[in-house]
Image (spheres, rainbow, N blue to C red):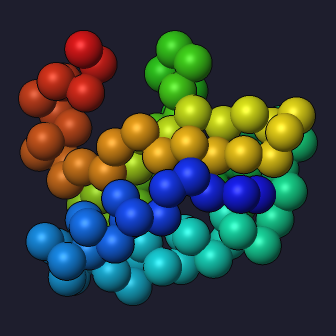
Amino acid sequence: MHVITKKRLDEFSKIHPDSRAAIETWHRIIKNNRFRSFNELRKYFPDADMVGKLIVFNIGGNKTRLIASIHFNRGKLFIRQVLTHDEYDKGKWRE
């Protein structure tokens, strides 16, 4: 899948260096696969959830939440936000 934009991953990792390894693992799996459906994606990420039209990934033992929009037919994943678990729970990302 083509990830748009990896810059958000890098920025989050600079602020939260303890998340870097988990984020890099997530990115490697996404980049090296072509998921054709949410069900296929869940084979690799069983904790991923659909929230409306977005997909929420739990990364690094649920310490990090990555919110993405995926166009399975085009092979593109758009990173909307990368948040700590606490930031995610505040719910501002839904606005």
Position of residue 6 relative to residue 78, above or below, is below
Res. 55 in view = yes
Quarter of the figure with the C terminus = top left
Q: Quadrant of residue 64?
A: bottom left
| Residue placed most toward the observer, 91 or 1 | 1
Total residue callouts = 0
Q: Residue drawn at (19%, 53%), measured in percent from left and top? A: 84
Instruction: Tell me where residue 9 appears, x and y as whole percent.
Output: 38, 65
Res. 65 in view = no
Q: Residue drawn at (26%, 67%), measured in percent from left and top? A: 11
Q: Is residue 37 left or right of residue 28?
A: right
Instruction: Tell me where residue 66 appears, x and y as whole percent.
Output: 40, 49
| Residue placed most toward the observer, 80 or 56 | 80
Q: Is residue 76 left or right of residue 59?
A: right
Quarter of the figure with the N terminus = bottom right
Position of residue 43 relative to residue 92, above or below, is below
Position of residue 80 relative to residue 83, above or below, is above
Q: Is residue 78 left or right of residue 83?
A: right
Position of residue 79 relative to residue 37, above or below, is below
Q: Residue drawn at (21%, 38%), measured in percent from left and top? A: 88
Instruction: Tell me where residue 23 appears, x and y as whole percent.
Output: 42, 72
Instruction: Tell me where residue 50 appears, x and y as whole percent.
Output: 56, 27
